Image (cartoon, rainbow, N blue to C red):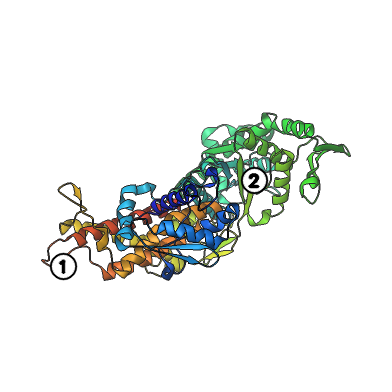
Amino acid sequence: MTPEELSAAISACLKDAVSTGEITLTESAVPESVRVERPKNRDHGDWATNIALQLSKQAGMNPREFAGILSNHLQGIPGVTGVEIAGPGFLNVTVDAATAGALAKAIVEAGTSYGTNQALAGRVVNMEFVSANPTGPLHIGHTRWAALGDAIARVLRASGADVTAEYYINDAGSQMNVFANSVLSRLHGRGVPEGGYPGEYIRELGDEVLKAHPGIRELTDEAALPVIRGAAYEAQMADIKTTLAGFGVEFDVFFSEKELHDAGAIESAVARLREQGHVFDDGGAVWLRTTDFGDDKDRVMIRANGEPTYFAADAAYYLSKKDRGFTEKIYLLGADHHGYINRLKAIAACAGDDPEVNIEVLIGQLVSVNGAKLSKRAGNIIELKDLISWLGKDAVRYSLARFPADSPLTLDPELLKKHSNENPVFYVQYAHARSRGTARNAAEAGVERQVDGVDAFDASLLDHATENELLSYLGSYPSIVAKAAELREPHRVARHLEVIAGAYHRWYDACRVSPQGDDPVLDVNRTRLWLNDATSQVLANGLELLGVSAPERM
């Protein structure tokens, strides 16, 4: 019995209890599906639900009384061997071996869709992350959000949300002039200008500019700067996109701040917010009254000299997201951006949105790497592409995904390069590779999931303790994905994959898929192959959510 089947069965029992008058609820209050989860203590049953706690007040009943009525109905479901009422009204359900084992076949048949759900269906989300300035290569400071942001987007999509991953290019403002001037200086063999960008990559960008514009050195500085600015920017953005692709991170939209300015969006944003009564003039400057919505001070949008502030661009960008139909906007910001939370939420409120619903700001803590070499090319920072080359995409992505964003993190290269169970990414990937090796060995021994085109599967044969344990964790996977999406915590998926890997290794040691020696192929072998392949599928599905490969061999 899959979680979905049990969920639907509990809902049907609830409807029966309502129809008989045992429970008083309106028809609309009865959910089509009921959330079920694996209990923390397996002695308490195979599945648990708190539906009685959720609906008892609406029914005017004590939760345990509600649970008792529902328990009587559940006892009649085929495959259910016991129902226990625990605590204030939890229902713990135990199923027989055949019912539990049926999950293995259901997982294989579901394939890549196993674990997906519709908990966030109808939610239209814009998720902005990385958004590094196009004035240099991506470095370790951008690495965490590249890995986590992409993984969060994946688990949100797996839960039914319509997600647009967006990179905001900060290509307006003074830093772009400093960037262009740095490249110009290197083209002419000058030193780094005051406040300019150091690093060998600036010379490399100069070479790219020279290839595109051979006569650039003949121009005056004034004439050359806008040409250099455009060409060096394009070259640097190409490098950023290539690095992200090598890290397995894809963006649906690259949004230009410069285009926001050029389109008059800043002026439009000021006018729109003024119409809503939140803009005021003081001291020759134009202000947004963000203190009305929890900000620590009001914010200048247009300076007295007529220049817009970066905050004005933030407001215009937020309105752009709203105008493009994104009801939810998620911002993933670095550890030094705590001050942005209130001001961004204030912008949302000034725009007429609910800051508790329409905007979410996630702050990630710093990440460091023991023994990492600084990049002379990038000006004494650790480049992301060097990190990938050194430790590998999978090791870096998995390691970053398996910790909450708000916890400081130091990566241990020696651990990540180990081919042992101490290395979490190796542990999980090896479990997948081992399962695929088991399938190949089974094929050589004549063990197949079908006989004469008919599925050879007897769920009642999956009755070993290690099989019950493995099935339990495989069954929990969909709820783990749903919770990871709800809380924006993909580390839950990573940690659960490690639990599955451990259960698989124990099962592998205890139960043979291929017969030994000249022993005949039996239904137990064929049925165990289904469980083996179900484990392969769940591990592959989970690794895909983390942007990590599932190797066939290791």
Q: Residue at x 73, y 47 (%)?
A: 343
> Which of the two residues, 65 or 145, is positioned nearer the viewer here?
65
Residue 443 in the image: state x and y as whole percent: 19, 56
Residue 119 in the image: state x and y as whole percent: 50, 47
The amino acid marked with disc number 2 is Val
Label 1 to label 2: alpha-carbon separation:
59 Å
Residue bearing the label numbered 1: 516
Q: Which residue is drawn at 61% across and 39% down?
A: 327
Residue 518 lies in what quarter of the image?
Answer: bottom left
Q: Identify the image quadrant of the C terminus.
A: bottom left
> Which of the two residues, 438 or 385, is positioned nearer the viewer here?
438
What is the crowding at mark 1: few (fewer than 14 residues within 10 Å), some, or many (at least 20)? few
Residue bearing the label numbered 2: 357
The amino acid marked with disc number 1 is Gln
State the SS at label 2: loop
Residue 321 in the image: state x and y as whole percent: 62, 37
Residue 301 lies in what quarter of the image?
Answer: top right
Residue 6 lies in what quarter of the image?
Answer: bottom left
> In this picture, is 380 found above or below 129?
below
Closest to the camera, between mark 1 and mark 2, is 2
> In this picture, is 146 found above or below 91?
above
| Residue 76 located left or right of residue 297 | left
